[in-house]
Amino acid sequence: MRSFSDAERQEFLAAKHVAVLSVEAADGRPPASAPIWYDYVPGGNVRISTSPNTRKARLIELAGAVTLVVQREEPPYQYVVVEGTVVETTSPSPMDVRDAIAIRYLGEERGRAFVRDIEPPDNVLISIRPDRWLSADFSGDL
C-alpha cells in the first residue's frame, strides 16, 4: 500500500465517486454519515448541494467541519479521505451548480430532469475547504 501524491489524490477526488460524508452529531449519537454527490476541481473546495431541512445539513451548520470519504470499491482498492472546514454556505444553491452536480452523476438529460423534479427546490450549497488528507492506493499489492 502507498499513499497518493498530492496530484493523484486531487485527481482521484475530482473523478466521479459517490462520497460518504460524516459530521459530528451534537446529540450524543455517533457521527452522522450519509452517501452524497459532490463536486470538486483540483485545488478548489468540495461542494455539496443538499436540502437545508435535513439532519445532515443542520449538523454540518452546527459542526462547521466534515469528513468526506471517496473510494474505489473494486480492486485495486483506492481511497481518499478529506477532513475539511465549511467555508461558505449559499442559499439557495445556484441552479447551475445543482445542474452540474446532477449532470456529473446522471448525464445531461437525466441530471437536468432530476434537478427540476426536486421538491422543494430550496437546496443549500456547502463549500468545504480540504484541510487534511489521507489516501491509500493498493494497486501495487495485487
Image: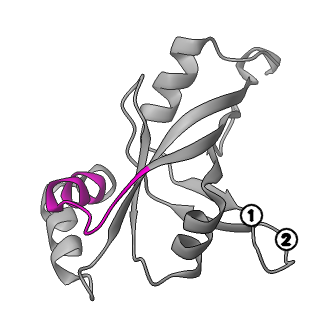
Q: Quadrant of the C terminus?
A: top right
The residue depicted at 16 percent of the width and 73 percent of the height is 113
Give the x, y percent position of residue 34.
62, 67
Give the x, y percent position of residue 123.
31, 72
Residue 119 left/right relative to 84: left
Q: Residues within 10 Å of mark 2 (few under 14, many from 20)?
A: few
Q: Which residue bears the numbered disc 1?
A: 24
User: Please, what is the three-letter code of the amino acid marked with disc 2?
Assistant: Pro
- Helix, strand or loop under label 2: loop
The residue depicted at 60 percent of the width and 55 percent of the height is 64
Disc 1 to disc 2: CB gap under 8 Å = no
The residue depicted at 80 percent of the width and 80 percent of the height is 27
The residue depicted at 66 percent of the width and 42 percent of the height is 74
137 to 112, vertically: above or below: above
The disc, 1 or 2, on the residue closer to the chain's N-terminal end is 1
Give the x, y percent position of residue 79.
67, 35
Q: Which residue bears the numbered disc 2?
A: 30
Give the x, y percent position of residue 139.
71, 20
Q: Quadrant of the N terminus?
A: top right
User: Please, what is the three-letter code of the amino acid marked with disc 1?
Assistant: Glu
Camera-side residue: 78 or 96? 96
Going by the picture, which residue comes out furthest to the bottom?
A: 119
7 to 10, vertically: above or below: above
Quadrant position of residue 5: top right
Q: Which residues are magenta?
A: 88-102
- Helix, strand or loop under label 1: loop
Residue 58 left/right relative to 102: right
Residue 47 left/right relative to 106: right
